[in-house]
Image (cartoon, rainbow, N blue to C red):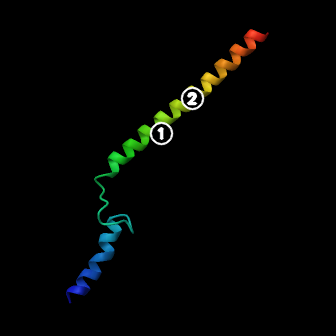
Amino acid sequence: MTEREDQSDSPSSGSRDGGGTSPHSGDADTPLTDTLLDQFSAYYLVAVLAVRALEEARRQRALAETG
């Protein structure tokens, strides 16, 4: 009888975890992970824009020196 109770509790606890996630991964890590991903994406965007701006500045300088 305890096996049936455990089996009936399993699907409901699985759906609380987001369906199929391991019981060790908790929702407590999610805000920190989301914050770190947002921060990484912002730094990546800034780095890409800085490289493109540097490439454009070098191109403009090369045009000014030759023209």
**Quadrant of the image containing the N terminus:** bottom left
Please tell me which residue is depicted at 28% across the width and 53% down the height of the picture: 28
Task: Pinpoint residue 57: horizontal percent, then vertical percent.
Answer: 64, 18
**Furthest residue toward bottom:** 1
Residue type, label 1: Ser
Residue that numbered label 1 is attached to:
41
Task: Pinpoint residue 66: horizontal percent, then vertical percent.
Answer: 78, 11
The answer to whether marks 1 and 2 mark residues whose Cβ atoms lie closer than 8 Å is no
* Left or right of residue 52: residue 25: left
Residue that numbered label 2 is attached to:
49
Please tell me which residue is depicted at 56% across the width and 26% down the height of the picture: 50
Please tell me which residue is depicted at 38% across the width and 42% down the height of the picture: 36
**Furthest residue toward right:** 67
Residue type, label 2: Leu
Foreground residue, 49 or 59?
59
| Residue 58 picture quarter | top right
Task: Pinpoint residue 11: horizontal percent, then vertical percent.
Answer: 33, 75
